[in-house]
Structures are given as C-alpha cells and as structure tokens.
Image: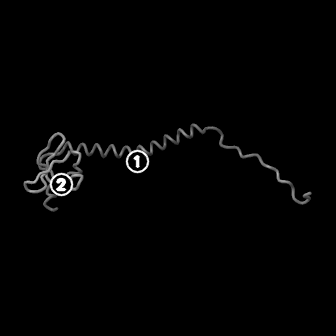
Amino acid sequence: MSFFISDAMAQAAPAGPAGGGLIEMVLMMGVFFAIMYFMIIRPQQKRAKDHKTMLEALSKGDEVVTGGGMLGKVAHIGDNFIQVEIADNVQIKVQKQAIASVLPKGSLKNA
C-alpha cells in the first residue's frame, strides 16, 4: 500500500548503565552523610562544647545575658543554678544552661 513511505521499524530499547547500582548508591549515601556531618552535626557539637566551657569559667561578678535577654551580674554560683543581680538588691535565680553569653566588663554601665 505505501509505495513512497517505508514502514517504521521498532528499535531496541537503549542499554542502561552497566551494573554498579549498589556501589553507586552506597557511595552516594556516604557522601550525603559526610556533608550532613560537616554542615550540621560538627558545628553543633563545637557550639555545645564552647557553651559548656563558658559556663565552667563563670565567676562571681561576671556580667551575663540570659536566654530570655536579662542582663545582670553573677552574684552566686551553685551546681545547677546561678543568682544574677539585675538591679540593686534585686536578684533572680536562673539555670546555668540559661546563660547565653558573658559580656565584657563594664557593659552593664553602657546599657
């Protein structure tokens, strides 16, 4: 019937990648874990270590900022709690973990 148009011939499907699927997947997972470790886990561990070192170095008279934003001087240090003087004769008790940072000496006078 078709004198001018030849019949289309079906071609074979192209060959997929030759083997190695499991090895490539394991390598990809290893690379993904390494990226997650260096981008998320390691910096978080370093931050926690620095915070613990800061808390151990606290002494009476240090000027601190709590996690809630309170500024004050350390009046007394206990095992789990710290008394922070936020005004004359006004002291509050906070957990050690609530101390966000230690300020340079004289910072409260400027605030």
The residue at the point 35 percent across, 46 percent down is: 43
The one of 84 and 58 positioned closer to us in this rendering = 84
Q: Is residue 22 left or right of residue 68?
A: right
Q: Residues within 10 Å of mark 1 (few under 14, many from 20)?
A: few
Number of marks present in the image shown: 2
Residue reaching furthest bottom? 110
Q: Is residue 20 left or right of residue 62?
A: right
Q: Position of residue 35 (x, y in %)?
A: 45, 45
The residue at the point 60 percent across, 39 percent down is: 21
Q: Where, quadrant-wise, is the N terminus in this rendering?
A: bottom right
Is label 2 in a helix, a strand or a loop? loop
Position of residue 48 relative to residue 71, above or below, is above
Cα gap from disc 2 to disc 1, whole angstroms:
30 Å
Q: Where, quadrant-wise, is the C terminus in this rendering?
A: bottom left
Residue type at numbered disc 2: Pro
| Residue on which the image places disc 1 | 39
Is label 1 in a helix, a strand or a loop? helix
- The label on residue 2 is none
Residue type at numbered disc 1: Met
Q: Position of residue 16 (x, y in %)?
A: 67, 43
Q: Position of residue 34 (x, y in %)?
A: 45, 42
| Residue on which the image places disc 2 | 104
The residue at the point 13 percent across, 60 percent down is: 109
The residue at the point 15 percent across, 58 percent down is: 108
Q: Position of residue 72 (x, y in %)?
A: 15, 54
Position of residue 104 relative to residue 50, above or below, is below
Q: Residues within 10 Å of mark 2 (few under 14, many from 20)?
A: few
Q: Is residue 80 left or right of residue 34?
A: left
